[in-house]
Amino acid sequence: MNENAVSTTRENVLEVRGLTKRFAGLTAVNDVNFHLGRGEVLGLIGPNGAGKTTLISMISGTLQPTTGDILYRNVSVVRAPAFRRAHMGIGRTFQIMRPFPGLSVLDNVAVGALFGGSGLRKLPAARERARACLQRLGLGHRVDQRADDLGGPDRKRLELAKALAMNPAVLLLDEVMAGLNLVEIDEVIDVIRSLRDEGLSILVIEHVMKAIRSLCDRVLVLHHGERIAEGSPQDVLASPAVIEAYLGKRKS
């Protein structure tokens, strides 16, 4: 897909301008710019330590950038706290899954419905939304189970269900397919496709290249905190600079 065609035919829901994050003497993300259109899937890839999770943490509000701006629907949210961004429609998953201990699977997801931009503030309605999200993720049969008793793959699904229950317009996915088998990966890919088709804008961090190739309209590559490539999945994944970043430079 031609990048210019994407940018001119889609309304930009999210725009990142010059985003930088420094931790003491370390620059984790350096002057990153990109946009995300309505109903678009943007892949965010790069080797471990490239700054991918730091970037989406700044977008979601769990980290404050050192410099730069974040526009959501043309309004700067860079100083808004994380809960306010969630209410506005920016949802995310976390790479390290931490279900609310002692709560059922259903009530873990209901918390997402109550916390996010769904407009639901009563527990019965939040549980109904949670039940629908869990059914969509193949966890409808586990609603009464304690969330902290779930295995790794089901915790991944739970994490996605919690984010969906928030009724986001922008969804930030941090390696939701890590640790899944091939069948489970295909199931999650189908869910993400259906969300995109419903108009959701999705930024997905993923090392599963099958998902990047089949899902993404565009791909952004970070290396040492800097953008080194952006474009169609086919062009980006064939780029010598991207191959070198992942595999290292060949010795002659």
Image: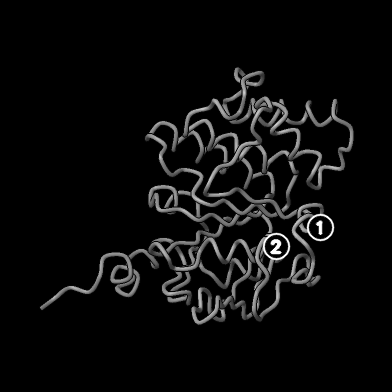
Assign a secondary structure to mark 1.
helix
Residue sitting at x 71%, y 27%: 132
Q: Is residue 179 left or right of residue 35?
A: left
Q: Amino acid at mark 2?
A: Gly
**35, above or below 164, in the image:** below
Q: Amino acid at mark 1?
A: Arg
Mark 1: few, some, or many residues within 10 Å (few <14, many ≥20)? some
Say the numbered circle drawn on residue 61: 2
**140, above or below 45, in the image:** above
Q: Compare residues 79 and 171 and report the one nearer the observer.
A: 79
Give the distance between the C-alpha atoms of the residues marked 1 and 2, in whole angstroms.
9 Å
Residue 28 point in image, percent of width and height: 51, 74
Residue sitting at x 53%, y 52%: 174
Residue 76, quarter of picture: bottom right
Residue 165, quarter of picture: top right
Q: Is residue 7 left or right of residue 165?
A: left
Residue 58 point in image, percent of width and height: 64, 66
Residue sitting at x 70%, y 66%: 12
**150, above or below 212, in the image:** above
Q: How is the image coloured?
A: one colour
Mark closest to the chain's N terminus, 1 or 2: 2
Q: Compare residues 61 and 119 and report the one nearer the observer.
A: 61
Residue ranking furthest to the left: 252
Residue 35 point in image, percent of width and height: 63, 69
Say the numbered circle drawn on residue 43: none
Assign a secondary structure to mark 2.
loop
From the image, which quarter does the C terminus lie in? bottom left
CB within 8 Å, label 1 to label 2: yes
Q: Compare residues 23 and 47 and report the one nearer the observer.
A: 23
Residue corresponding to mark 1:
84
Mark 2: few, some, or many residues within 10 Å (few <14, many ≥20)? many
Residue sitting at x 74%, y 58%: 82
